[in-house]
Image (cartoon, rainbow, N blue to C red):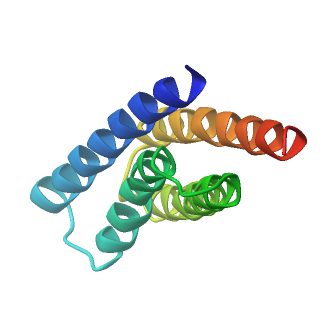
Amino acid sequence: MKENFLVDLSKQFAVDIVNLCTEIKENRKSNVLLNQLLRSGTSIGANIHEANYAASKADFINKFQIALKECYETDYWLGLFRDTHMITEDEYKDMFAKCSKIRKLLIASITTAKENG
């Protein structure tokens, strides 16, 4: 059940990332860095989704670990966009909170999977 919640949460986060990047591109500055945020922010959900079809527990854990790394990378890009005024402080706080929630759930899921291995 937690994994389905995580799939849904990470998919909504990916939608939010796409919308944020679209808004930045249309209304502010077009920047090659948008592709970095878009890639890492949408990769989180893709790896979580793919973990549902893992061939083994080790494969499942690996996909979640990749998603976790993408969360950390997304945090980096969001901070950089805030610091360069590409997004507002409020946009940053909202997206950072969502990413942090996913990250915490991933860490808990990885820990549980390893303990039950």
Query: Count the marks: how many?
Result: 0
For the residue pair 21 and 67, the one nearer the viewer reads as: 67
Residue 4 appears at what percent x and percent y?
A: 47, 27
In depth, the one of 75 and 112 nearer the eye is 112
The residue at the far right in this view is 115
Q: Is residue 71 left or right of residue 78?
A: right
The residue lying toward the viewer, choosing from 52 and 78, is: 52
Task: Where is residue 97? Give x, y as percent.
Answer: 57, 33
Residue 16 in the image: above or below residue 82: above
Instruction: Using the image, determine if residue 84 lies above or below residue 96.
Output: below
Measured from the top left, where is residue 38 in percent x and y?
Answer: 33, 62
Residue at 63 percent of width and 56 percent of height: 56
The residue depicted at 48 percent of the width and 43 percent of the height is 52
Residue shown at 70% from the left, 59% from the top: 58
Q: 19 left or right of 9?
A: left
Quadrant of the rendered image containing residue 86: bottom left
- Quadrant location of residue 39? bottom left
Tell me: residue 80, above or below residue 48: below
Residue 45, horizontal then vertical, whole percent: 42, 48
Q: Between residue 69 and residue 88, name the one nearer to us.
A: 69
Which image quarter holds the N terminus?
A: top right
The residue sitting at the bottom extreme is 32
Q: Is residue 110 left or right of residue 9?
A: right
- Looking at the image, the residue that sits furthest to the left is 26
Q: Residue shown at 66%/33% (left/top)?
A: 105
Q: Residue furthest top?
A: 1
